[in-house]
Amino acid sequence: MTPVLLGLSLIDLALIGGVVVVLPLGLGGPWWEWAGAGVAVAVACPLEQGSAAAVALAGPWVLVASVAVGRALRAAGPLLFWSRQDLVRMLGCGYALFAACWFVLSRAGARPTGLHEPIVQLTAVHFTYIGGGALILALIAFETFPAGLSRRVGALGLVLVGGAPPVVALGFATGMAIPQVGGAVLMTVGVYCTAALQVVGAIGRRRTVAERSLLAISGLAVWVPMALAVAWAAGQHWDVPLLSVPDMVRTHGAANALGFVVCGLLASRLHPREGAAWS
């Protein structure tokens, strides 16, 4: 993609923002660790793919994500006693580590399962924002409502957001329509469940104006962009109107990253009693 800032493309900027902002907000841990990894990512992105420097500078993110996985394992204790939050945090950290590994592949110029750029780097972007963002927001939305229909909607959203990414990845790896399109549909339904509960939560009288505004933005930002994602996945197999990858980055990507994930995580920080129990 065409560079837009200091040799960095929109995809690069989304990835850097994910490492520096989304992962520490969503998964916790010392911010300076994620910031250091983000700086290395920023330096690595403009470098020539396949160069030793590009690959080496991708390494700090893998290290920090691995430390986050270890930290989550220690906090969770024996598997038999894992809570729902423990499971979600482990899955989120695992997705962050998976994203970091795919960034290494991207910088190395690798083409795993025949995929090419920018899909390889976009895999890192998606798993970053799912692991540190969408999954955490789904957990918060679920735990906001103690019972009733909203609780069931939240449970569905949490399960789908957590489980859909491997299905989508299987579709890309195999080129099969059912997992690729079906996974996109599952992810979309999961995000819709979370977004709907965020809109309901934005009406809560106990919230400040800032909380309600951020929740409303987060809950409203995803409806059209996620539909575009389903259309793009379907367009890889059938004659369906779809946007180009650069247009998807500017529309689907920007709305989901900034509107849904960042605004949602900031709202959770302003209302910590409903946020994640880690820091």
Image (spheres, grey):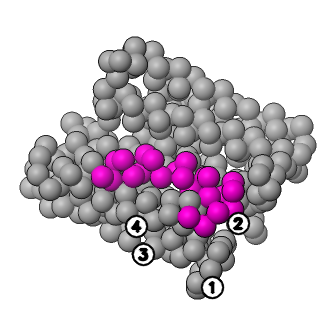
Q: Which residue is mark 2?
A: 4
Could you say whether the residue bearing mark 4 is in a helix, strand or loop? loop
Structural crowding at the residue carrying mark 2, measured as other residues with C-alpha within 10 Å and reported as few (<14), some (14–19) or many (≥20):
few
Could you say whether the residue bearing mark 3 is in a helix, strand or loop? helix
Quadrant location, the C terminus: top left
Amino acid type at circle 4 is Val
Q: Which residue is mark 3?
A: 224
Q: Is residue 176 magenta?
A: yes
Q: State whether residue 221 is above or below residue 77.
A: below
Amino acid type at circle 3 is Val
Q: State the residue in front, 161 or 66.
A: 161
Between the residue at mark 2 and the residue at mark 4, the CA separation in whole angstroms equals 24 Å
Q: Which residue is mark 1?
A: 239
Q: Considering only order in the chain, which callout, 4 or 2, is on the residue closer to the N terminus? A: 2
Could you say whether the residue bearing mark 2 is in a helix, strand or loop? loop
Q: Which residue is mark 4?
A: 222
